[in-house]
Image (tube, helix red, strand yellow):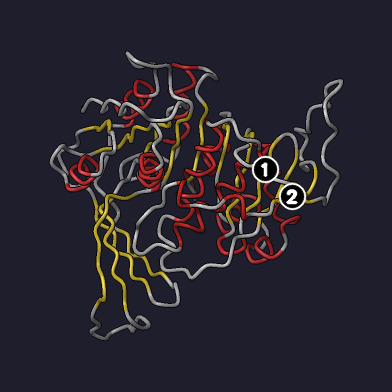
């Protein structure tokens, strides 16, 4: 088990973000000059190799933006993924497994169309308790600072871990730290469904339209076309122990639903080069805005701006926050969430909620 790298001096004050990537990878991205043709030999115009995985990508954005993070993942010290993270200054806490991590291949076309080929990854059979202990320990106080602000559980599960692994990891953090550490989840399929069925409380989930439809039903295309329908569907997750839902909708932007209301923000027009890591970058932008004390509207604006910036970069490159423009993102309030977990009453003397359908100004730096 490696020791987390000490955060660099001079980073801005803010909560530490611990990411957990159970199935990390070496992401190889190949850019083509034309359309991908099955059965043909084609030459690449550019190729890159980056340490990847959803949680890893979140940590990469945090480090690029000057934030404080530790990436928790399985892997041995000399694995190319761990070496790549060390080279890029990403602090890690690794669980040795004695096996090589997987490689994923992404092929991108000039139109922005992306084709992904993902390996299954090495088995972690019998190692869930070790991983849970590592996550809970890494999220705790350090000699120089308090416990983490966020633990982010992200990506697929490798072979050998049970379907309820996410619930086990959440439970380990809650048992060690209670509600002092917030938990975000970006996963899908059976593990995500099992987590929702476990009854564990989750502070934030970040599905896309397809992942939301897997859980609550409905048509993903309609969610992308109709923000109000998307918000109503996202609010149904609040009935299952989720406090906040950040629903990313690709080129259609994103929707945010929490206990005080729901908002939508359209994505800016960009020339998409690669969608690899765009959703992960959106999540990182949201979390960095949250640890800075931003309002829900500003968090959504930053999430959309960061995701758009990532989509405009080649391969699996990720943006820093200072390369994004959240002030250009228009946030529109949709109304209170359609959930039994309703918004709290307005305290005496506080401003009343923004009327449904009204455009919300996003203050600079809010």
- The residue at the point 59 percent across, 39 percent down is 365
* Of the image marks 2 and 1, the number of the one nearer the N terminus: 2
Location of the C terminus (image quadrant): top right
- Look at 30% across and 29% down and name the residue there: 8
Where in the figure is residue 79, as x and y percent of width and height? 16, 44
Residue receiving disc 1: 297
Return the x and y of residue 33 as percentages of the image width and height.
32, 81
Residue shown at the point (39%, 18%) measured from the top left: 140
Q: Which residue is mark 2?
A: 232
Neighbours of disc 2 within 10 Å: few (<14), some (14-19), many (20+)? some
Measured as percent of width and height from the top left, residue 188 is found at 49, 49
How far is the residue under mark 2 from the one under mark 1?
Answer: 18 Å
Which numbered circle lies on residue 269?
none
Q: Secondary structure at mark 1?
A: helix
Q: Secondary structure at mark 2?
A: helix
Looking at the rendering, which quadrant does residue 274 occupy? bottom left
With respect to residue 259, does 359 lie above or below? Answer: below
Q: Is residue 135 left or right of residue 303?
A: left
Looking at the image, which is closer to me, 124 or 154? 154
The quarter holding residue 127 reads top left
| Quadrant in the picture for residue 362 | top right
Q: Nearer the viewer, residue 347 or 233?
A: 347
Relative placement, left or right, of 40 versus 109 is left
The quadrant of the picture occupied by the N terminus is: top left
78 or 15: nearer the viewer: 15
Q: Are marks 2 and 1 in contact (CB under 8 Å)?
A: no
On screen, residue 283 above or below 265: above
Within-10-Å neighbours for mark 1: few <14, some 14–19, many 20+: many
Query: Going by the image, does 231 lie left or right of 49?
Result: right
The answer to whether 61 is drawn above or below residue 213 in the figure is above
Q: Locate residue 44, reporting x and y percent.
A: 25, 76
């Amino acid at each position: 088990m490696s020791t987390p790298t000490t955060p660099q001096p001079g980073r801005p004050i803010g909560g530490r973000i611990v990411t957990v990537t159970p199935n990390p990878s070496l992401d190889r991205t190949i850019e083509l000059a034309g359309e991908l043709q099955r059965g043909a030999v084609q030459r690449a115009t550019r190729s890159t190799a980056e340490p990847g995985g959803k949680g890893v990508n979140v940590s990469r954005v945090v480090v690029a933006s000057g934030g404080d993070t530790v990436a928790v993942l399985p892997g041995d010290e000399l694995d190319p993924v761990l070496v790549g993270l060390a080279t890029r200054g990403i602090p890690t806490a690794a669980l040795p497994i004695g096996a090589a991590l997987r490689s994923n291949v992404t092929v991108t076309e000039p139109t922005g169309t992306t084709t992904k080929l993902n390996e299954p990854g090495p088995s972690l059979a019998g190692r869930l308790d070790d991983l849970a202990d590592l996550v809970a320990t890494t999220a705790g106080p350090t000699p120089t600072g308090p416990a983490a602000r966020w633990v982010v559980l992200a990506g697929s599960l490798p072979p050998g871990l049970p379907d309820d692994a996410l619930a086990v990891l959440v439970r380990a953090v809650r048992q060690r730290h209670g509600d002092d550490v917030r938990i975000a989840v970006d996963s899908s399929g059976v593990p995500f469904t099992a987590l929702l069925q476990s009854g564990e409380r989750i502070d934030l989930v970040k599905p896309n339209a397809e992942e939301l439809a897997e859980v609550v039903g409905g048509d993903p295309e309609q969610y992308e076309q109709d923000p109000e329908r998307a918000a109503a569907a996202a609010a149904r997750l609040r009935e299952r122990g989720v406090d906040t839902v950040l629903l990313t909708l690709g080129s259609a932007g994103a929707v945010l639903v929490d206990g005080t209301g729901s908002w939508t923000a359209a994505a800016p027009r960009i020339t998409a080069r690669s969608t690899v890591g765009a959703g992960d970058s959106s999540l990182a932008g949201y979390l960095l805005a949250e640890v800075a004390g931003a309002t829900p509207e500003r968090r959504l604006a930053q999430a959309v701006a960061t995701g758009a910036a990532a989509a405009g970069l080649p391969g699996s490159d990720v943006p820093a926050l200072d390369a994004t423009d959240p002030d250009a993102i228009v946030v529109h309030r949709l109304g209170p969430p359609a959930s039994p977990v309703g918004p709290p009453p307005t305290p005496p003397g506080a401003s009343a909620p923004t009327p449904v359908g009204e455009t919300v100004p996003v203050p600079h730096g809010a």
